[in-house]
Image: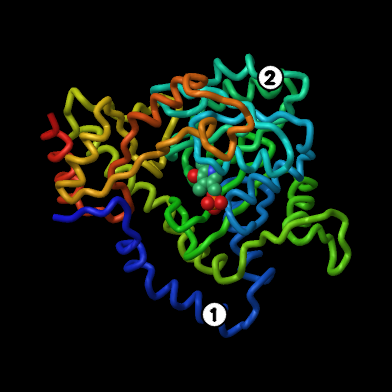
Amino acid sequence: MKIPFVSFLPMEHELDKELRDAFERVYKRSWYIDGVEDAAFEKAFADYCGTSCCVGTGNGLDALMLALKALGVGRGDEVIVPANTFIATALAVTYVGATPFFVDADIRTFNIDPSGIEDKITEKTRAMIPVHLYGQPCDMDSIMDIAKRHRLYVVEDCAQAHGATYRGRKVGTFGDAAGFSFYPGKNLGALGDGGTIVTDDEDVAKKARALGNYGSDYKYHHIYQGHNSRLDELQAAFLSVKLPHLDRMNEGRRRIARKYLKGIKNPAVILPYVPEYADPVWHIFGIRCKRREELEKHLNEAAIGTNKHYPIPVHLQECYRDLGFKKGDYPVAEEISATELSLPMYYGMPDEEVQYVIDAVNKFE
Ligand SMILES: *Cc1c(COP(=O)(O)O)cnc(C)c1O
C-alpha cells in the first residue's frame, strides 16, 4: 500500500461534473475578473462564516496584509504573531512595514500561548494575529480579553481553519477582520491561488477591496497606492462548487482524526490535544516524537507520506536574520519544529489506509 500525504482525488472525483460545469459557465460568459462569480462566492462565504462582509483576494498572504493595511497598521507599528506558524503570518506584518513581535506556543495546542502575549505589548503594539494553526482554534476568550484591555486590533489567520469553531462560534468572527487562504491544499481550496478577508466592519471591507484593486474606489480613480490582488472569476466559481461540501468534508477529516486518536498507541508518540473549547477541522494531524527523523524514516519506508510543519521556526528563518533572533529565544516553537510530524490527512482517505498508518506508527519502537 502506498499512502500519499495528501490527495485531492476523492474530492475531485465527487465534484468532477460540477467543477467542469463551473469552468464552462465562466468560459462562456468570457468575463474573468471582478464579476458575478466573485460577488456570489463572497456573499456565500460571508453567510457561511456569519460575517456581513467578505472581500476576495489573490491569496491568503494578501488577505492578511490587506486587512492590516485597511485597519491602518503600518510603519512604526508592532504586531503580535505566534512564533509557531507558517511564514506568511509574519510576512503580512513586514509587508505593511510593521514589526512582528513573536509569542511562544503552547506545547499542547501548538497555538499561541496567551499567557505570553502581555509581556510583548509596548506602546507601539497595534494588532495581534492569532493563527488557528492546523485547523485548531486558538484560546479566543483570553486573546480577545487582552485585545480589549490594550485596545489592539485582532486579525485572525484562518488559512488552515475554514469552518473550525471555538465554543460553537466560527473562527474568523472574533477579531476585527480575518484572512483565509484558498490554496489548493487548504480545507477549502481553489484550483489555484485565492484568498479572502471577512469582517463585520464595512469601512475596513471597502478599504481592503480598494487596496486590492490598485487602490481604486472607482475605475481609474486611485485613492491609495494599492495592489493587484483579487479573487478571479474561475477560482470563485470553483470555490462556489466546493463551499456547500465544506462541512461534510471537514467531518470526513474529523472521522480520520478520531481514528488516529483512538488507534495510535505508542509511548514514543504524543498525540494532538484538543481543548474543551475547540472543534478543530484537522487541516493537519500533527503528532510529536522525540525521535522524529527515525519515525519519519520508518513511515516513509512503509510508503506513507509525511510532512513537517514547520522544520524551521519563523524567528530563525534567514529572511528575518535582521530581527536578531537566535536559537533558544522561543523554546516551545523550536521544540515543536524539532519534534512535529504530520500524518496523512485528506477528505476521502480510505479506512484501510488510516488503519495502515495507525499500525505503522504503533510498530515504531
Ligand atoms: C497557507 C497559509 C497562509 C497563506 O496563504 P496563501 O494563500 O498561501 O498565501 C497564511 N497563513 C497560514 C497559517 C497558512 O497556512
From the image, which quarter does the C terminus lie in?
Answer: top left
The quarter of the rendered structure image containing the N terminus is bottom left
Instruction: Judge whether 138 appears above or below 32 on screen.
Output: above
**Residue shown at 50% from the left, 36% from the top:** 85
Relative to residue 92, is residue 227 drawn left or right? Answer: right
- Residue denoted by label 1: 25
Q: Position of residue 73 (x, y in %)?
A: 76, 37
| Mark 1 surroundings: few (<14), some (14-19) or many (≥20) residues within 10 A | some
Identify which residue is drawn at 72% across, 42% down: 96
Q: In the rendering, which numbered label is found on residue 69? A: none
Q: Nearer the viewer, mark 1 or mark 2?
A: 2
When asked about the image quadrant of residue 333, the answer is: top left
The kind of residue on which mark 2 rests is: Ile
* Neighbours of disc 2 within 10 Å: few (<14), some (14-19), many (20+): some
Which comes before the other along the chain, label 1 or label 2? 1
**Residue 50 visible:** yes
Scheme by which the image is coloured: rainbow
Q: Position of residue 209 (x, y in %)?
A: 74, 56
Q: Which x, y percent locates residue 83? A: 52, 29
- Identify which amino acid the numbered label 1 is placed on: Arg
Tell me the residue at 58%/50% (across/down).
60
Does residue 159 appear in this view?
Answer: no
> Secondary structure under badge 1?
helix
Picture coordinates of residue 251, whole percent (x, y): 35, 47
Q: How many marks?
A: 2
Q: Is mark 1 within 8 Å of ligand 1?
A: no
Q: Which residue is mark 2?
A: 121
Q: Are marks 1 and 2 in contact (CB under 8 Å)?
A: no
